[in-house]
Image (cartoon, grey):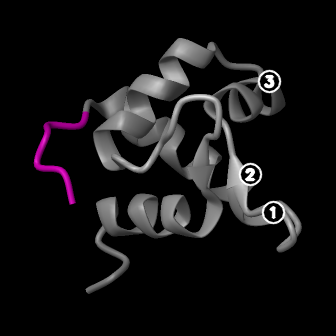
Amino acid sequence: MNTKEIKRATIGRLPQYLRYISSLPQEITTVSATGIAKALDLGEVQVRKDLALVSDGGRPKVGYNRKALIDDIEQSFGYDY
């Protein structure tokens, strides 16, 4: 897990990301910051920056592994304890 400081605004958006990603069908194994941004009507640069604070699993032109990203966001909230 990253030890970077997470700003309050980012903490407010992370649950939105988690809800959206978790709602995707299980068959979808990767998700992009661009896709998340479009679905939630947010800026894609902001989504990338937010996700970079909690996950280092994103790959250019591929995106994030859906399950790993869910785990990373949950871990940032301490859900794994």
Secondary structure state at the residue bearing disc 1: helix
The answer for how far apart the CA atoms under marks 1 and 2 are is 5 Å
Mark identifier at residue 20: 2
Mark identifier at residue 57: none
At a point 73% along the width and 63% down the height, the residue shown is 29
Marks 2/3 in contact by CB < 8 Å: the verdict is no
Q: How many marks?
A: 3
- In the rendered image, residue 3 lying in the magenta stretch gets the answer yes
Relative vertical location of residue 13 with respect to residue 22 in this rendering, above or below: above
- In the rendered image, residue 68 lying in the magenta stretch gets the answer no
For disc 3, the marked residue is 38
Residue 9 rendering spot, x and y as whole percentages = 39, 27
The crowd level at tag 3 (other Cα within 10 Å; few <14, some 14-19, many 20+) is few
Left or right: 74, with 33 as reference point? left
Quarter of the image holding residue 6?
top left
For disc 1, the marked residue is 23
The crowd level at tag 1 (other Cα within 10 Å; few <14, some 14-19, many 20+) is few
Residue 18 rendering spot, x and y as whole percentages = 60, 56
Residue 78 rendering spot, x and y as whole percentages = 29, 71
Amino acid type at image mark 3: Lys
Quarter of the N terminus within the rendering = bottom left
Secondary structure state at the residue bearing disc 2: helix
Task: Give the residues drawn in magenta, as a range.
Answer: 1-6
Quarter of the image holding residue 5?
top left
